[in-house]
Image (cartoon, rainbow, N blue to C red):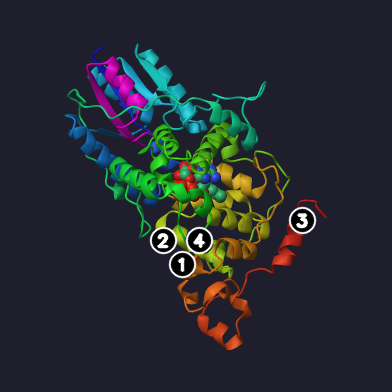
Amino acid sequence: MRVAIVLFTADLRLHDNPVLRAALSAAESVVPLFVVDSGVRDAGFTTPNRAAFLSECLADLDRGLRARGGHLVIREGDVVREACRVAAETDAAEVHLAGGSSGYAQRREDRLRSALAADGRRLRVHDAVVTALPPGAVLPSGRSHFAVFTPYYRRWSAERLRPVTGAPRRVAVPTVSTLPLPAAASLAPGTASPALARGGESEGRRRLAAWLRSGVDAYAVRHDDMAADATSRLSPYLHFGCLSPVEVIDRARRRPGGAEAFVRQLAWRDFHHQVLAAVPGAAARDYRTRHDRWRTDPEELAAWKAGVTGFPVVDAAMRQLAHEGWMHNRARMLVASFLTKTLYHDWREGARHFTDLLIDADVANNQLNWQWMAGTGTDTRPHRVLNPLVQARRFDPEGEYVRRWVPELAGVAGGAVHQPWRLEAVRRERLGYPGPLVGLPDALARFRRARGLT
Ligand code: FAD
């Protein structure tokens, strides 16, 4: 075969990329294509934070391809139409694509398959690119997906992953027109958060190597310590596919002890993808309805978003999100519980705000983690409520995380920072920090009533 197209989506990498590898072995030359997808943009999914990260990913991918004799080809518009146009221009016989789990990805795949077939061309979809195991690779008997994590994890762990492959040495690209690499501002207008991680495969690989050298071994004991910041921070690189989950797991498992606690988190990622692939509607609807009649209170919601609820650990987390476009997992859990259970607001409001700011926001992991926390998802204890004070005392006992993100409280020493309302009145007033938005016992009683638990 003369020409094949690699349609890059959530696999912006050269290493361990089965899509690229298959196209290279099928054809004499390949078109490494990225389409700035108007469908994704119009759905509001390209935000300033993700646009900044994405533009760096694309520039890095282009540099990597140039070092191998090729370059990235950029188009803009409807992804199916553009892929078909490039196929016609280069007379490509095949388009290679990574399989995705969202409803959008599944529809894109179907549309592309039939549009190409109409021109006598073929779509080839590759598995285990975005996730370590493809959705559906392990199934409970007679059902479309696992609805509980623990049995899924048992089966997932027993599966052998495909072998890891390196980056190609050469990538020959036929003559084809391209747009310039997109700048962040052209992908999404607006201001990005001030302290975003840098995007791209090179940066992702550098961080992975550093993490395996000096972070992962302490993960099991330190990952919940919010001040220690002792998690990998690889989620944005996994989300954009700068890193292959198969390679990350393979390299982590080679550590003495097998880095089991860390690998288990990557299984959570696959778990949510397999739920979404089987139930695409869970992106917008309750996976398991609890018949909630959520409260609406725009001022409360705005206070939660702005990090001025008067609960220091909640506010610290929300401010970290605004500043970095990323938040610690424990912090994500407690702010989500606070919004959906303590304030009893719809999980979709929280998921939308996270989607607006997180670099790593993806439909599977964001929506389904929100549903897990709201008790409308796959949590087997759907009505548990995380008390922000208990969480703060356990996971930020010295209050360091709070002082890092809430400067008004920087002068309050130790764990006392978690309850500024207990400080003497004169001092409290001088802080310029709000009082608590709600009383926790009343809020808990309200939630329990709403769920019919009392
Ligand atoms: P590490 O602790 O180092 O874990 C390694 C990798 O495992 C992560 O990079 C991630 O890919 C995966 N992982 C870890 N925890 C989870 C989890 N609970 N579910 C799925 N994958 C996991 N993660 C996203 O990637 N995108 C999201 O949009 C997202 N939204 C979330 C929303 C809420 C309300 C909650 C509670 C969690 C959400 N998570 C999301 C999961 C988790 O918080 C992040 O993956 C994690 O904080 C990323 O930091 P890290 O890379 O340092 O993780």
Mark 2 vs mark 4, CA separation in Å: 9 Å
| Residue 288 occupies quadrant | top right
Q: Are marks 1 and 3 in contact (CB under 8 Å)?
A: no
Q: How many marks?
A: 4
Q: CA distance from mark 1 to mark 3?
A: 32 Å
Which secondary structure lies at badge 3?
A: helix
Inspect the image, locate mark 1, and give the three-letter code of the amino acid beneath it: Trp
In the structure shown, which secondary structural element does the residue marked by tag 1 occupy? Answer: helix
Closer to the observer: label 1 or label 4?
1
What is the three-letter code of the residue carrying label 4? Answer: Met
In space, the residues marked 3 and 4 are separated at their CA atoms by 25 Å
Residue 405: image tag? 1
Q: Position of residue 210 (x, y in %)?
A: 34, 48
Q: Residue at x 24, y 33 (%)?
A: 72
Q: Secondary structure at mark 4?
A: helix
**Which quarter of the figure is the C terminus placed in?**
bottom right
Tell me, for residue 323, which label it has, or none.
Answer: 2
Where is residue 327 shown, x and y percent of the image?
47, 55
Which of disc 3 and disc 1 is earlier in sequence? 1
Confirm or deny contact between disc 2 and disc 1 (CB under 8 A).
Answer: yes
Q: Magenta residues?
A: 11-37
Q: Is residue 252 above or below residue 446?
A: above
Q: Indicate the amino acid at tag 2.
A: His
Real-space CA distance between mark 2 and mark 1, rounded to the nearest whole angstrom: 9 Å
Q: Where is residue 312 shown, x and y percent of the image?
A: 55, 69
Amino acid on which the number 3 mark rests in the picture: Arg
Say which residue label 4 marks.
Answer: 318
